[in-house]
């Protein structure tokens, strides 16, 4: 592996253990996670000079976030980039840039959500005229009220039409993530609290036989809707070396957005641009990656992003995921979503931060589905609608 610049590292993480949180606000969840992540790193509130958030904690004036005020932080760098599920990969990229430029030394990323407790209909709630006049950016789609699940089903149908991808192939993704979830006590508790019919491993027949949500996507191909939260602390190299945990280095990052176009290929995501940027900066190839933490709002999301990041060619994702090769305990690379993913561990609305946390756990050797000798990981978030306008943020990470 070529020598890389190691100037910023994840030094502290904490994931809120419950996925059904009816007694706390999003700000309280964020604060609890920040406290624990700083303890994990061996740092204090006074060390933080950069704050990153996506606004889910609420604003107090003209969109100004309330997090710094709530935490009592006077940060020199404040970033409120909001790109949906990829927000926290964007934040990690921006924190690395600020640290490299000497504008920050310790960055705090936090997330808190009570999506489930609030009764949000994330995947099946329509858009359409109930929200008022259509926005110019979506006036060709919003009128018809396509649901989020329907959008991803459209991509799955197109992928099947172009490349012959089957339900049985997509099911392999659900099977691998459920296996990993069964080894994660917090994920098992989440499935129990959210009234899953079963919390054990599943089969292709289980996935294919589960209720159809939006043809061809079945229920066991859809992420859960949960509450949740977490925090990540990123520090400059000299600070990282003195922290309690071994540093997990941010080697390369990439950011991209994609918009619907006439004649555009909806089976290609923005990760096709964000991925090469991240791998190029990191100086590594996709086939060197041991663990891939990929946004799994639906199975088709993972399959598409595996292709777009270069783990296989476009159209070969179906055959690539077959045979259990995505499991943590195989010799094949990469293992995916070893915490159980959005499909079977948590999905509070924007899951990007959890991708960074599990990648860090793997590279520390602390995962409940630990990949043997994991040295390199990628976290790739996706926000918005895969078949429409969306964002992708990709971060390549390395163990010390």
Image: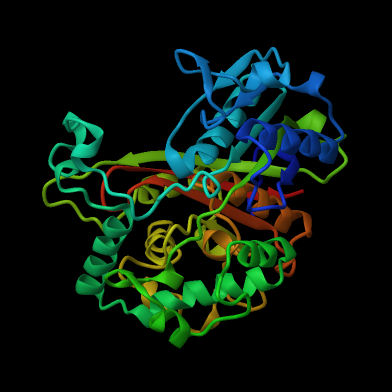
User: Can you say whether 86 is above or below 208 in the image?
Assistant: above
Q: Position of residue 160 (x, y in %)?
A: 25, 73
User: Which of the pair 299/294 is nearer the observer?
Assistant: 299
User: Can you say whether 57 is above or below 216 in the image?
Assistant: above
Q: Position of residue 378 (x, y in %)?
A: 57, 53
Q: Residue at x 17, y 51 (%)?
A: 264
Q: Residue at x 27, y 70 (%)?
A: 215
Question: How many badges with numbers are in the image?
Answer: 0
Q: Work out whether residue 289 can be spotted.
A: no
Direction bottom: furthest residue? 205
Q: Work out whether residue 119 can be spotted.
A: yes
Q: Is residue 69 left or right of residue 91?
A: right
Q: Is residue 176 left or right of residue 372?
A: left
| Quadrant (top left, top right, bottom left, bottom right) of the N terminus | bottom right
Q: Residue at x 59, y 27 (%)?
A: 52
Q: Quadrant of residue 11?
A: top right
User: Which of the pair 188/90 is nearer the observer?
Assistant: 188
Q: Residue at x 44, y 62 (%)?
A: 302
Q: Position of residue 250 (x, y in %)?
A: 64, 41
Q: Is residue 156 left or right of residue 122?
A: left
């Amino acid at each position: 592996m070529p020598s890389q610049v190691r100037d910023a590292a994840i030094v502290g993480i904490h994931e809120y253990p419950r996925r059904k949180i009816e007694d706390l606000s999003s700000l309280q969840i964020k604060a609890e996670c920040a406290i624990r992540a700083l303890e994990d790193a061996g740092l204090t509130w006074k060390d933080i000079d950069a704050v990153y958030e996506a606004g889910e904690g609420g604003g107090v004036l003209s969109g100004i976030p309330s997090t710094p005020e709530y935490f009592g932080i006077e940060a020199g760098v404040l970033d409120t980039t909001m790109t949906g599920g990829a927000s926290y990969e964007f934040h990690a990229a921006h924190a690395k840039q600020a640290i490299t430029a000497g504008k920050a030394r310790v960055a705090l990323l936090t997330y808190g959500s009570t999506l489930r407790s609030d009764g949000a209909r994330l995947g099946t709630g329509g858009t359409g005229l109930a929200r008022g006049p259509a926005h110019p950016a979506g006036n060709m789609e919003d009128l018809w009220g396509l649901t989020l699940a329907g959008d991803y089903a459209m991509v799955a149908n197109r992928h099947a039409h172009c490349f012959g991808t089957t339900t049985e192939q997509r099911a392999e993704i659900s099977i691998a993530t459920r296996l990993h979830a069964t080894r994660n006590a917090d994920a098992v508790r989440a499935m129990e609290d959210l009234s899953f019919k079963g919390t054990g491993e599943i089969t292709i027949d289980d996935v294919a036989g589960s209720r159809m949500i939006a043809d061809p996507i079945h229920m066991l191909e859809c992420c859960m809707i949960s509450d949740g939260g977490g925090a990540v602390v990123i520090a400059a190299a000299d600070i990282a070396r003195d922290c309690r945990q071994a540093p997990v280095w941010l080697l390369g990052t990439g950011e991209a957005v994609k918009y619907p176009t006439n004649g555009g290929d909806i089976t290609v995501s923005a990760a096709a641009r964000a991925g090469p940027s991240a791998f190029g900066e990191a100086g590594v190839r996709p086939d060197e990656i041991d663990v891939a933490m990929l946004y799994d709002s639906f199975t088709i999301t993972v399959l598409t992003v595996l292709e777009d990041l270069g783990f296989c060619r476009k159209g070969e994702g179906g055959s690539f995921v077959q045979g259990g090769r995505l499991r943590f305990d195989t010799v094949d690379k990469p293992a995916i979503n070893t915490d159980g993913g959005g499909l079977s561990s948590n999905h509070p609305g924007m899951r990007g931060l959890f991708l960074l946390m599990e990648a860090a756990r793997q590279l520390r050797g602390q995962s409940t589905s630990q990949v043997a000798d994991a040295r390199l990981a990628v976290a790739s978030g996706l926000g918005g609608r895969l078949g429409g306008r969306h964002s992708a943020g990709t971060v390549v990470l390395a163990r010390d």
